[in-house]
Amino acid sequence: MVVGAGVVGLTSAARLQEAGARVAVVTADESADTVSAVAAAVWYPTHTDEDPRVLRWAARTYEELCRQAADGVPGVVMRPTRMLVRQAVGEDPWWSAAVPDFTRAAPPSAQYTEEWRFTVPAVEMRPYLEWLRDRLGGAVERRRIERFDEIEAPVVVNATGIAAGRLCGDPDVYPARGRIVLVANPGLVTSVRDEDSPAGMTYIHPRSRDVVLGGTFEPGEWDTAPDSRVGNEIVARCADLVPELANATVLAHVAGLRPARRGGPRVEADPAPLPGGGRLIHNYGHGGAGVTLSWGCADAVTELAV
C-alpha cells in the first residue's frame, strides 16, 4: 500500500507494480489537489544539496523522463534551458553529471559571469498524473489516515509529503511555499533561469499552452491564498528577463507548499516494524525536486520492498 498520490507516491506505486507486486494507493487528496499538480515540473534539483544518493536518483529520473518524452507520454517533453549565473563558479555544478549536453557559455551581459545551457525533461503535471493513475488500473482509494498502523499490508510506502511530519513525528519536515504566475504562451520554447537575481528567484518555463513564471521559496509559510502584489512582482522581473512576456495575458496566480526536509529526502526502510508485522518504507522530503527525483526514488523504494 502506497500512502500519497502525488508524483512521488504514484511513481513508487508504478514501479512496485512493474516489479510484480499487488499495489493500491490510499490518499487524503486527489492527485489534482496535491502540490505536484501545480509544480512547474522542469527537471532540476531545486534547493537540493549535493549528495551521491540524490545525484543517482536525479540521473535515473532524467533517463526515465527522456525515454517517456521519446515515447510520447502525455505531458512530457524535452525543454532547452538557459541558466544565467551571477556568481563566479570554478567548476560544473554537481548535478550536471546527469545531463549529457550541459555546456558553459559566455554571459549575455555584464551582470552575469556565465551562462549554462542544457536540455532537460519538462512535465505538464495534470495530464501526467492522470497517466500515472491510469497505469494503476484505478487502485486508488480516497481516505485520510491518522496512523500507519491503520493500514493492513505487508509493505506500506510513506509518500505523504508534508503530512509525513505529523505521521512520523519528524520535526525536520517543513513547508516551503512557492508562488508562481501562469500566463498565456506568446511562443516561447526555452526555459530561462536567474535564480540569484537581487529582485528574487526568477524562472520562466514554457508549456504547450501557458508559461510558468516564478517564483518564491518561502520556508515555513503555510498560507496559499493568492497574493497579487507578489504575483505582479514575479511577472515584472520575468518580463525584464524575457521581453516577449511584457504583454502576456495573466491566467492565474498559484501557490503550493513544497514538502521540504532538513537533511534532504528520507528514502529508507523504517527500523521498527508496524504493529501487524508489516514493513514501513519512507519516501518523502523532496522539497522542490519531487519530479526531478521521483523515478530514481521509486526505484530505491522498489529495491527495499520487493
Image (cartoon, rainbow, N blue to C red):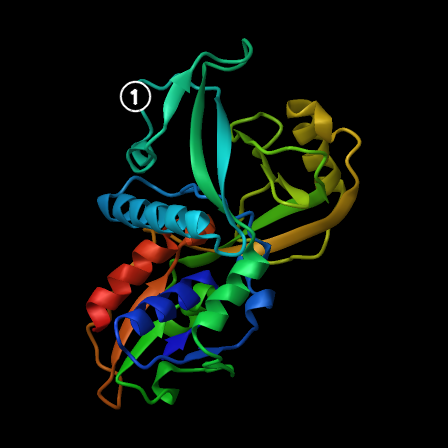
Pinpoint residue 89: horizontal percent, then vertical percent.
36, 19
Q: Residue furthest top?
A: 110
Pinpoint residue 130: horizontal percent, then vertical percent.
54, 66
Residue 299 location, quadrant: bottom left
Any part of residue 169 in sight: no
Left or right? Give the position of 101 relative to 69: left
Quarter of the picture holding the N terminus: bottom left
Any part of residue 302 in sight: yes
**Vertical order, 176 against 79 (above or below):** below
Q: Which residue appears at 79% of the width and 40% of the height?
A: 249
Pinpoint residue 107: horizontal percent, then vertical percent.
49, 13
Of residues 67 and 123, the one nearer the viewer is: 67
Q: Secondary structure at mark 1?
A: loop
Pinpoint residue 236: horizontal percent, then vertical percent.
72, 30
**Vertical order, 276 against 228 (above or below):** below
Disc 1 crowd, CA 10 A, few/some/many (<14, 14-19, 20+): few
Of residues 56 and 120, the one nearer the viewer is: 120
Q: Which residue appears at 43% of the width and 19% of the height?
A: 87
Quarter of the picture holding the C terminus: bottom left
Of residues 255 and 95, the one nearer the viewer is: 95
Q: Which residue appears at 36% of the width and 29% of the height?
A: 101
Residue 232 location, quadrant: top right
Q: Residue furthest front?
A: 71
**Vertical order, 29 against 148 (above or below):** above
